Structures are given as C-alpha cells and as structure tokens.
Amino acid sequence: MRVLSEAHIPELPNYYRGKVRDNYDLPDGRRIIIATDRLSAFDRILTCIPDKGHVLTQTARYWFEATSDICRNHVLAYPDPNVVIGTRLDILPVEIVVRGYLAGTTGTSLLTLYKQGQRSMYGLRLPEGMRDNEILPEPVITPTSKAFDGGHDEPLTPKSVVEHRLLGEAQWEEVSHYALSLFKRGQEMAGEKGLILVDTKYEFGVDADGQIVLADEIHTPDSSRYWMADSYQESFERGDRPVSFDKDFVRSWVSERCDPYSDEIPEIPATLVEATADIYRGAYEKITGATFRPDPAGATVLDRVRKNLAPYFTKG
C-alpha cells in the first residue's frame, strides 16, 4: 500500500514531528506542513491509513476556502496534495472544541464525562436524563488545554482560560465568536450534503502582527465527527451510534478491545485499515462533492512530496 508514514526531509530546516503532521519552519516566516497517513487517537499513533493525509489536506482546503470570509486562515499555497504552506503562527494554548451533541469516546468528550456522572463540565450544566448522541439545545464550546509533545488535553472552563491567562478576555471572546461562526457554517454546508457536523476542534494562532488566525485543519474527518443525517433519528431511538465516517470507526474498534490509554494497542487488521481508507476517501467526496483522485506520481508518496518541495530546500 502507498502510505506516507513519515515525512522527514533533511534538506528542509527546523523539523518538528507532530502526531499526524510533520512540519518545517522556513527562515522567511513560512511553515511547511505535511499531512502524513498516521492515524492518531487516545494520545498515540494507532496505524497508517492510505490516502489519509491527501484527504485531510484537500478537505481542509475546501473548508478554508469556504470560510475565509469568517476568519483569516494560515494558508499560503498547496504545492502537493499532502502539503500546505502556511504562515508561521504562535499557537494559542487552548484547543477550541465545539459540540452540537452529547457524543464522543475520548476522555474529554461530553458523553464520556456525562456517563461518569458529571453534570457540570467546561463551565456548562447539563440536565439529568440525557441520552447518548442527543442533540444539545445549542452548540457549546468545550475548551481544553493544548497538549504539546504528546501530552494529555485537559478540560477547561471559559473562566479558567482567562483567570490562568491562557488567553486574554478579548482573545477568548474573539476565538469563541470565530469558532461558533465556523461551526454554524459547517453545519449548514454539511446539512446540504446530507451530513450532520456533530462536533469539531479548532486551533488558532497569533501572527507576527498579533492577529488571531485559524491554523492546522478545519472540518476534516480527523478534527470532526460527522454522521449521516438520514441515519440519525432511527439510530438515536434504538440507542445505537449513528452511521459516521470519521476516525471513530477505528477508535471504537480499539476501545472495544482494550483500555486505549494504558493497554498495548492490538494490531489493526489490514481489512480494517483498507476499509478505513475507503471511509476517508468517501468522506472527502461526500463533504466536498468532488471525486477523490489519488496522485500516483513518484515511486512512493514521500518521493512525490520531496520532488514538489524541492524549491523550498535549504541551499548550501
């Protein structure tokens, strides 16, 4: 299978490896961000999924272009299907998660915390008697601390964000406005395609002029949960998880077999890997309305990426 498990390119300067993306900072203030095919969940890498990095980059491109009137984003160029050249930002230390439903499988999801008996979380108060995957009265922001270097995200409240000076009050108000506006646009456009945008995360940074800019990715199958709209009501009434095409597909398989935060992860079957690749490709087509076309150039995906990034190589 053609997969991009890593994108370490020695000719590029200032390498930093993230969970999914490999990054390089150029001397002129631009950042090269290469989306690999690594699949991350539960604060660890589970496997690699063919075409995943391509899907993520191009799905984010679709959404960045569709929301540029709401919020500035970091994008400057797309030299390769897996690569974006962006403005280098100082990433804000708060990850903004917007949720429209009582859903999720991670330790910080509303549903997980609710099932643990919590009713007050993230500065919110949820009523008794809510059911799995129930729609919330209105979308809510559930901020978490931004975990760097593989650390755990921790739940925050709007009050604690400001009191601990993670963000200034004006910054919090600005990112909250952007996040809810982006989520509203996302839900509206997804609804037109027969999808429900359930929840999503946003990352914001500050540029050299001190302006807040949307970074990383937006409304991709990795950063967001989508359900098929026509499956929701019947699934909800049965108490089943609605049909989705996000990485919950693999997360659920893993969490059914172990404690993913402490146990060794079982080997992901090849059939599940390929099925997940089909889900990502299908997600791109369903979200964007365009046909997914893999780029077969180069002996490997990394060879193709290297060739397309050659103009950015450090001279000398």
Image: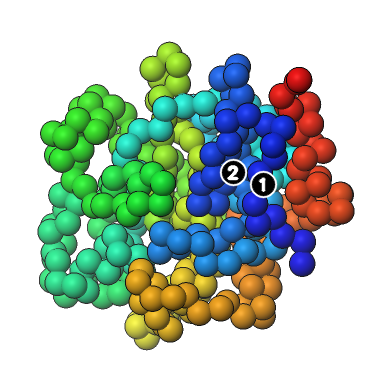
Q: Disc 2 marks which residue? A: 22
Above or below: residue 218 compared with residue 105: above
- Figure disc tally: 2
Left or right? Give the position of 109 relative to 49. Answer: left
Type of the residue with mark 2: Asp
Q: Which mark is residue 65?
A: none
Q: CA distance from mark 2 to mark 1?
A: 6 Å
Task: Tell me the quarter of the picture where residue 209 sits.
Answer: top left
Answer yes or no: is residue 311 visible.
Answer: yes
Which amino acid, mark 1?
A: Ala
Q: Residues within 10 Å of mark 1 (few under 14, many from 20)?
A: many
Q: Which residue is mark 1?
A: 7
Side (left or right) of 233 relative to 73: left
Q: Residue at x 16, y 62 (%)?
A: 126
Front in this rendered view, residue 77 or 59: 77
Question: Does the CB distance between marks 2 and 1 fall below 8 Å?
Answer: yes
Q: Is residue 250 left or right of residue 27?
A: left
Q: Is residue 167 above or below residue 102?
A: above
- Examine the image and state in which quarter residue 61 appears: top right
Residue count near mark 2 (Cα–Cα under 10 Å), binned few <14, some 14–19, many ≥20: some
**Quarter of the rendering occupied by the N terminus:** bottom right
Q: Quadrant of residue 66?
A: top right
| Badge 2 or badge 1: first in the primary sequence | 1
Residue 289 appears anywhere in the view: no
Task: Answer above or below: position of 200 versus 212.
Answer: below
Disc 2 secondary structure class: strand
- In terms of depth relative to the viewer, which is nearer, 145 or 104? 145
- Quadrant in which the C terminus is drawn: top right
